[in-house]
Image (cartoon, rainbow, N blue to C red):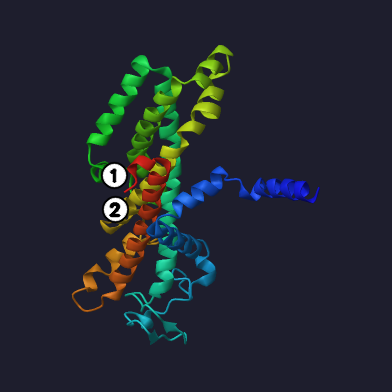
Amino acid sequence: MSDGTAGASGAGDSLRPADVETPLRRFVADFAESRLAVVGFALLSLIVLIAFFAPLIAPQNPYDLLEVNILDSMLPPGETGGAGYVHLLGTDDQGRDMLSAIFYGMRLSLTVGVTSALLSMAVGTTIGLVAAFAGGRVDSFVMRVVDIQISFPTILIALILLVALGRGVDRTILALVVIQWAYYARTVRGAAIVERGKEYMEAGLCLALPRYRLLFNHLLINCMPPLLVVFTVLIAQAVALEATLSFLGLGLPITQPSLGLLIANGYDYLLGGRYWISVFPGVALLLTLVSVNLVGDQLRDVFNPRLRR
């Protein structure tokens, strides 16, 4: 009896829920195979936390005139300002603490990048699903529009739009949405065409389910893996484009400087030896882009094992 009980107990232990490999555990294990991806995820998490809690952890509010002292302008890294605290990364030409300015710049750059990526995904995904599901002339027309837009350089389209619309956070986001929706539409359309011919879609059509349920409750769910990969990649692209546009003076206004505008503010002082005004925001931008791209590359490999290096 004891042997049977032990055997039953052993069989029960081997089937414990904790030992069952769930999709989430499998995804985490596959993602953790790349040390670079784990480092990128940790770095990206840190950047997101810094950006989110910037008003709480920044030494000063660099855009509050009551906290900024013009007499502290151009202080090198490690110097103590008039307020009595050390400016670890120095100050700019207006006396703003560079560490605080970078924290706030990260906050604004990520806000523009993530918001534009989400809006682009919503627009492009809807158009791609409708094109794949409708087929025929609708699909051909949408794909020709997508091909035409993707054939133009993205920075050129953004420059034309912002010259016409003017500077501003909302206008920059709108320009990025116009640029990026086509990538989502093409990705979703390609994945949806493969899914459209499968049995579950045919069963839904036979049951006369509403079209919106077929599109968003069934078809979209199975198109999410490639969509998430494109989402992470285009967040990095949106942050880089916004920084480029702000550096050229066509993105965000000077009252709301992002990392790109912070780099532009110190460009004229590089030859004078005041490197910290441009270099430190540039390093912050580089780390942000690298971390997002590392996470996006590993997501691509996890969702499509054939692409693993």
Write down the quadrant of residue 86 in the picture.
bottom left
x and y percentages locating residue 267 in the rendered image: 24, 68
Q: Which residue is mark 2?
A: 245
Horizontal side of residue 94 vs 26, given as left or right:
left
Residues at badges 2 and 1 in contact (C-beta under 8 Å)? yes
Horizontal side of residue 23 vs 91, given as left or right:
right
Q: Name the residue nearer the viewer: 226 or 85.
A: 226
x and y percentages locating residue 13 in the rendered image: 69, 50
Q: Residue at x 33, y 52 (%)?
A: 242
Horizontal side of residue 58 vs 279, given as left or right:
right
SS under mark 2 = helix
Mark 2 burial class by Cα count in 10 Å: few <14, some 14-19, many 20+? many
Q: Name the residue nearer the viewer: 132 or 308.
A: 308
The amino acid marked with disc number 1 is Ala
Gap between marks 2 and 1 measured at Cα: 8 Å
x and y percentages locating residue 180 in the rendered image: 35, 40
The amino acid marked with disc number 2 is Leu
SS under mark 1 = helix
Indicate whether 45 appears above or below 301: below
Indicate whether 237 appears above or below 124: below
Write down the quadrant of residue 71 in the picture.
bottom left
Label ID, residue 287: none
Q: Which residue is mark 1?
A: 158
Q: Residue at x 34, y 24 (%)?
A: 142
Q: Residue at x 71, y 46 (%)?
A: 12
One can see residue 125 in this view: yes
